[in-house]
Structures are given as structure tokens and as C-alpha cells.
């Protein structure tokens, strides 16, 4: 096995250029000015003592603060904003307890490769080790969940760390970065030069690596290209289509925790053992790919991994062994651009690509049973509404019902809960999605368990006037775990998974939103149409028959 690629890694020594001077500037003003210069227009936040100076500074910088009802919601919103705009998403929370509430979604943002900057207030640096109010070693906690964590202790450190945090979050394999700012640094005043970051590293591939990949694609009989979350169809635009067309190679973007059993890729899994070359562009070789092992993949298949992150390349080497033919340290986007600049190869392998595309398009179907609404019935009705809109964003979250939604509902753009398998962020994703793409109709599909995580954000949506539709597939239980209990322990051993028939629609109405409750399939289309046309945040609570997630013939 020959491991190739010596692209220069991101340098932690950040060079800045002095461009202008701030007179008697607070740390808060410095931070906000640098954010504004880097394109930040909106911050998702929940207020708290240690970040009030930053709130004050945002007024003069004309940065909007969307204040949420929970710190975790702010991070989920920042993640959705990042995915749909291509910009860095910023969440701002207060010290220890606020930071603690915000930690969980960092795992989702890291897994989904979302460039998020979490800024947290912190106890004064000058009181370190003396038991100050809400003193906590935040960066020690966040380090394993983010690409990098900083705690600046001077104005100069604050300027440098802010720019470095933005660069790290948005380059290479994108992901979250944490910046914990002590209160005395936020309050500190001083005259200083305002820095401007140097151009971030693009992690360009070496010419010999590009040549080797081109040769592999030219000689393989049944090659397959896999991409990760940062290169999904929503975030990569037409880049993937251009790659597939140029090389007559099937391209699959994989971002579900179900991996090869993701119903969104139909029955592709049964064809994968035929592949003789797999090119992973930012797609981690992990459990989602069955670790690249037989019988899901041929033991004779060669693998090429292109990733800017060393850990991902090491993981591929560990899981693939001698089948890893090439490991390239480079940005997958840069590699794609380099491939597309190469002379176009002769069209071939059209049959292989057609077979993969056809298998990926297959979808599960469920025959409605009388007056009961199934997951498929509900998702099909939502799809009719989506198709009636000019442009749309579809949000999918949750367990069993969430998998049906991911398989059956497609819009012009999509945000899902990603490879982490975490649930609960969909309502937050939807709010930020509507702000990121105000011209689009936004619909979020989730289970009745999922909606409970951040239900209070309906109030945020009503207060801020952000209109989107939430569709709840309500089977009155945590169905994924309920089905595990039945399968593993027997139907008489179920416990802790039952939920009530709560009227989430009425609760949403009480928070200032549109609400609808549906138990009859004949009423679905009208209820959904009214929600889409209401011009308000809407909650459509639909009683469904609890079913397992779709599997398909390939599983």
C-alpha cells in the first residue's frame, strides 16, 4: 500500500495584515467588527451576563441577533444557516451553564461538516483559579467536539484567534470551532490595529495525485465516487453532476447514519459488491460504509481516499488495509475542480452508471390501510405540496418516521440530522433555513419525540415572523427504540417509549402559530395546503400508524 499526498496542513501560525486602527475599542467591538468583515450578518444567540457587551456592539455593526429559547437551538440554527448559505454560522451563548447547553449540537455539526463558530462568554481571565462566577474550563470540554478551541486572554489574542477560528471552520473538512472569551477581555479597551486574515489554505492536490486518480478512473470498469456531507447535492450545487457527466461515473452523496441502508439511496447497496474502484471525496470510511468490508464490498475493490483531515485518512488506512491504493491530503472540492480541468475522457461505462442511478431512484411504498395514515401516506401528501411550490427546502429529522421522510420527500435543498444520528434540531433548522432562503417554502418533517426537544422555538418563529411548516408524524411513542425492544426482548418487555396523544398543534397555536390536527387521510391535503398558505409558522400534527423505517429490497 502506498500512501500518497503531502499537501501542506493548515498552519496554526496565523498571519494578519494591519489595515486600520480602532480607537479605544472594547474587545466586544473588536470581535463584532471582525465578524462583520468576514461576512457575518446574523448571529443566533441566547442572552446572558458575560455576553451583553457583544450584544451592545452588534447594534453599531448592524448584525442581527436572533435570540432563541435554548442555547442548543442557537447552535442548530447556526448549522442550518451554514449549510444553506455556504457562510460560517455563528452561535453566541453565555458562560458555563449556557455553554453546557450548547455543547450537544457540536457533535452534530462536526459529523455534518458544518462550519459553525460557537462563541461563549467566560469568567474573567484575571480571576482564573479563584472561584469566579460560572468559572469553567470550557475549552477542555469542547476540544473533542470541535476542530479547534481558543480562549484569548488579550485583545491581540482575541483578534488573532477570531480570524484563525473562522479560517479553520471553513477550510479543509469544514466543522465547528469554539471561541471562549473571558469577560475582562470583552470589556477591555485599547487602541489597536484591526487585522485582516490572510487567504485561507485551499489544500490543493498535487499534480501527481490528480494524474494517478485520472488513470484509475480511466482504467476501472465499474468505478464509484462517494462524497460526504460537505459535498451533498445541496451544498455542492452542480459540481457533482458535472463530475458524473464528465467521467460517466455514478456519484453518491452519503450523509445518513444509516449509511448503505439509507432509504434515500434506494437499492444501491446490492450493486456495490460489483464496484472495482471507489473514490471517496471527503467521505469517511467508517460504519456508514460498513468499514469498506465484505460482503458489502468486493475484497478486490481498490479504494482512493481524498481528505484534508489526517484523522479521516488514518481511519481509511486502518479499515481498508492493503485495499487502500491511494491516500491524498487535499480538499475534495479542489480535487474535483482539478479533475474537471483535465481533458475530457471518452464516454464509457454508461450502463454501470445507469444501473446505479436507477437503483438509487427506487423508493419504498406502503399501501394505506383503511382510514389509518401511514408514514408513506403522509410523506407522499407532503411531497405533493412541495412540488406545488416554486422553490423549497426540506428538513428531515427523527427516527423511523424521519427515515420515511428522507426517502420520500425531496425539495430543491435539504437539511437532515446527518451522520451523528442525533435528533431534535429540525425545528431550529427550519427557522434558520427560512432566513437563509427567504424565497423558499420550508417544510420540516419530524416525529412526535423529535418535536419535543425544541418546541419552544415555535415562539421564536412567531416572534421573529419567520414562516415555515412543521409536519409531525405522531405515533405516540419513540418508535425506533420501541421496535428494538420488541425485536430484542419481546412485545411484553417494552418500557419507557410511550408518549401521549398531546395536541402539539394547539400548543403551537398558543405560541402564536398556525395549527392543524389530522387523523383522516382525506383531510391531509387541505390541512397541509392551508399550513403552507398561512404565512405563519405552522404545526400540522398528524396521527400516524407507527411503522418500522423503510428498508427496501437491497437490505
Image: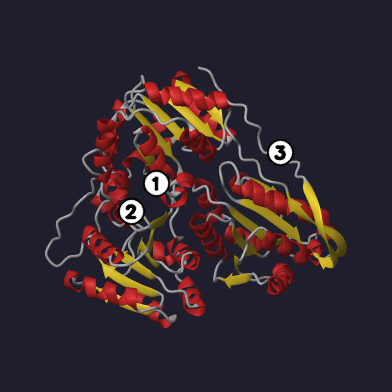
Give the residue displayed 15% in from the left and 60% down from the top.
Answer: 368
Cβ atoms at labels 2 and 1 below 8 Å apart: yes
- Mark 2–mark 1 Cα distance, whole angstroms, equals 9 Å
* Quadrant in the picture for the C terminus: top left
- Mark 3–mark 2 Cα distance, whole angstroms, equals 38 Å
Q: Is mark 2 on a helix, strand or loop?
A: helix
Q: Is mark 3 on a helix, strand or loop?
A: loop
Counting residues from the N terminus, which is met first, the one under dot 3 or under dot 1?
Answer: 3
Image position of 76 (left or right of 295): right
Cβ atoms at labels 3 and 2 below 8 Å apart: no
| Image x and y of residue 16, in percent | 78, 49
Q: Which mark is residue 256?
A: 1
Question: Which residue carries the number 2 mark?
Answer: 406
Give the residue displayed 44% in from the left and 40% down from the top.
Answer: 227
Question: Which residue carries the number 3 mark?
Answer: 11
Instruction: Locate residue 252: give its quadrant.
Output: top left
- Which label lies toward us, 3 or 2? 3
The foreground one among 318 and 392 is 392
Image position of 130 (left or right of 230): right
Counting residues from the N terminus, which is met first, the one under dot 2 or under dot 1?
Answer: 1
- Mark 3–mark 1 Cα distance, whole angstroms, equals 32 Å
Q: Residue 447 carries which label?
A: none
Give the residue displayed 66% in from the left and 32% down from the top.
Answer: 8
Q: Is mark 1 on a helix, strand or loop?
A: loop
Residue 285 position (above or below residue 439): above
Counting residues from the N terminus, which is met first, the one under dot 3 or under dot 2?
Answer: 3
Amino acid at each position: 500500500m502506498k500512501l500518497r499526498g503531502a499537501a501542506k496542513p493548515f498552519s496554526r501560525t496565523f498571519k494578519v495584515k494591519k489595515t486600520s486602527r480602532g480607537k479605544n475599542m472594547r474587545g466586544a467591538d473588536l470581535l463584532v467588527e471582525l465578524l462583520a468583515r468576514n461576512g457575518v450578518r446574523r448571529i443566533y444567540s441566547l442572552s446572558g451576563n458575560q455576553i451583553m457587551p457583544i450584544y451592545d456592539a452588534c447594534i453599531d455593526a448592524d448584525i442581527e441577533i436572533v435570540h432563541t429559547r435554548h442555547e442548543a437551538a442557537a447552535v442548530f440554527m447556526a448549522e442550518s444557516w451554514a449549510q444553506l448559505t455556504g457562510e460560517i454560522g455563528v452561535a453566541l451563548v453565555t458562560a458555563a451553564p449556557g455553554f453546557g447547553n450548547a455543547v450537544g449540537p457540536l457533535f452534530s455539526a462536526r459529523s455534518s461538516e458544518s462550519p459553525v463558530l460557537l462563541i461563549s462568554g467566560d469568567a474573567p481571565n484575571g480571576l482564573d483559579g479563584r472561584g469566579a462566577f460560572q468559572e469553567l474550563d470550557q475549552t477542555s470540554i469542547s476540544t473533542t467536539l470541535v476542530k479547534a478551541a481558543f480562549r484569548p486572554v488579550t485583545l491581540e489574542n482575541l483578534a488573532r484567534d477570531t480570524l484563525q477560528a473562522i479560517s479553520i471552520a471553513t477550510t479543509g473538512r469544514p466543522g465547528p470551532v469554539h471561541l471562549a472569551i473571558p469577560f475582562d477581555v470583552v470589556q477591555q479597551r485599547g487602541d489597536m490595529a484591526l487585522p485582516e486574515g490572510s487567504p485561507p489554505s485551499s489544500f490543493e492536490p498535487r499534480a501527481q495525485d490528480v494524474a494517478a486518480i485520472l488513470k484509475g478512473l480511466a482504467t476501472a470498469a465499474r468505478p464509484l465516487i462517494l462524497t460526504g456531507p460537505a459535498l451533498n447535492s445541496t451544498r455542492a450545487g452542480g459540481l457533482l453532476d458535472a463530475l458524473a457527466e464528465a467521467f460517466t461515473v455514478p456519484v453518491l452523496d452519503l450523509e445518513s447514519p444509516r449509511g448503505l441502508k439509507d432509504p434515500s439511496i434506494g437499492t444501491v447497496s446490492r450493486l456495490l459488491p460489483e464496484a472495482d474502484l471507489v473514490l471517496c471525496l471527503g467521505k469517511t470510511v467508517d460504519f456508514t460504509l460498513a468499514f469498506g468490508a465484505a460482503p458489502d464490498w468486493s475484497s478486490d475493490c481498490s479504494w482512493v481516499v481524498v481528505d484534508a483531515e489526517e484523522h479521516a485518512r488514518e481511519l481509511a488506512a486502518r479499515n481498508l488495509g492493503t485495499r487502500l491504493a491511494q491516500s491524498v491530503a487535499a480538499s475534495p472540492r479542489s480535487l474535483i475542480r482539478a479533475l474537471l480541468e483535465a481533458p475530457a475522457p471518452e464516454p464509457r461505462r454508461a450502463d454501470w452508471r445507469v444501473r446505479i442511478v436507477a437503483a438509487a431512484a427506487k423508493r419504498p411504498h406502503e399501501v394505506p390501510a383503511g382510514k389509518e395514515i401511514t408514514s408513506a401516506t403522509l410523506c407522499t401528501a407532503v411531497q405533493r405540496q412541495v412540488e406545488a411550490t416554486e422553490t423549497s427546502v426540506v428538513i428531515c429529522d427523527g427516527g423511523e418516521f424521519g427515515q420515511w421522510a428522507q426517502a420520500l420527500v425531496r425539495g430543491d435543498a435539504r437539511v437532515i440530522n446527518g451522520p451523528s444520528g442525533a435528533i431534535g434540531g429540525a425545528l431550529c433548522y427550519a427557522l434558520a433555513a427560512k432566513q437563509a432562503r427567504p424565497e423558499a417554502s420550508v417544510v420540516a418533517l419530524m416525529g412526535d419525540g423529535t418535536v419535543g426537544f425544541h418546541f419552544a422555538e415555535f415562539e421564536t418563529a412567531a416572534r421573529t415572523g419567520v414562516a415555515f411548516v412543521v409536519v409531525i408524524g405522531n405515533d405516540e411513542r419513540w418508535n425506533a427504540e420501541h421496535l428494538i425492544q420488541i425485536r430484542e426482548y419481546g412485545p411484553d418487555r417494552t418500557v419507557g417509549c410511550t408518549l401521549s396523544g398531546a395536541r402539539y398543534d394547539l400548543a403551537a397555536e398558543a405560541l402564536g402559530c398556525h395549527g392543524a390536527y389530522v387523523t383522516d387521510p382525506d383531510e391531509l391535503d387541505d390541512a397541509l395546503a392551508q399550513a403552507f398558505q398561512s404565512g405563519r409558522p405552522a404545526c400540522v400534527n398528524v396521527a400516524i400508524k407507527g411503522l418500522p423505517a423503510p428498508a427496501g429490497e437491497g437490505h
